[in-house]
Image (cartoon, helix red, strand yellow):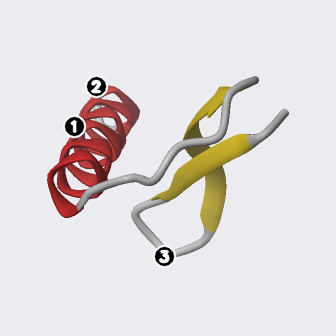
Amino acid sequence: MRFFAGHPVESPSGHRIGVLCVFDPEPRDPGSLEQTQLAAFAHAIQEEIWRRGTD
């Protein structure tokens, strides 16, 4: 693995319960747009987990 990027996923109480990550066998230089998109995806997953936890 030559590239890894991740963003934490947290529980409603603020505990880190996982990470959304991407990796690639080729080296990369992540741009700010890619980092912003990764964070947005992680937040969407986090919100879905929170929503399902209240059903």
Distance in Å between CA atoms under marks 3 and 2? 19 Å
Q: Earlier in the sequence, mark 1 or mark 2?
A: 1
19 with respect to 36 (left or right): right
Check residue 9 in the rendering and tell me which mark sits there, or answer none: none
Quadrant (top left/top right/bottom left/bottom right) for the N terminus: top right
In front here: 54 or 46? 46
Check residue 44 in the rendering and tell me which mark sits there, or answer none: 1
Please provide percent x and percent y for residue 14.
Answer: 48, 76
Q: Are the residues tagged 3 and 2 within 8 Å (C-beta)?
A: no
Q: Earlier in the sequence, mark 3 or mark 1?
A: 3
Please provide percent x and percent y for residue 9.
Answer: 49, 53
In the image, what residue type sits under mark 3? Gly
Q: For label 2, count other residues whose C-alpha is less than 10 Å away and answer few (under 14), some (14-19) or many (20+).
A: few
Mark 3 or 1, closer to the camera: 1
Query: Circle 3 sits on which residue?
Result: 14
Q: Residue furthest right?
A: 1
Query: Circle 2 sits on which residue?
Result: 55
48 with respect to 9 (left or right): left
The answer to whether residue 10 is visible is: no
Please provide percent x and percent y for residue 26.
Answer: 68, 28
Q: Are the residues tagged 1 and 2 within 8 Å (C-beta)?
A: no
SS at circle 1:
helix
In front here: 39 or 50? 39
SS at circle 3:
loop
Mark 1 or 2, closer to the camera: 1
Q: For label 3, count other residues whose C-alpha is less than 10 Å away and answer few (under 14), some (14-19) or many (20+).
A: few
In the image, what residue type sits under mark 2? Asp
Q: Residue furthest bottom?
A: 14
Distance in Å between CA atoms under marks 3 and 1? 16 Å
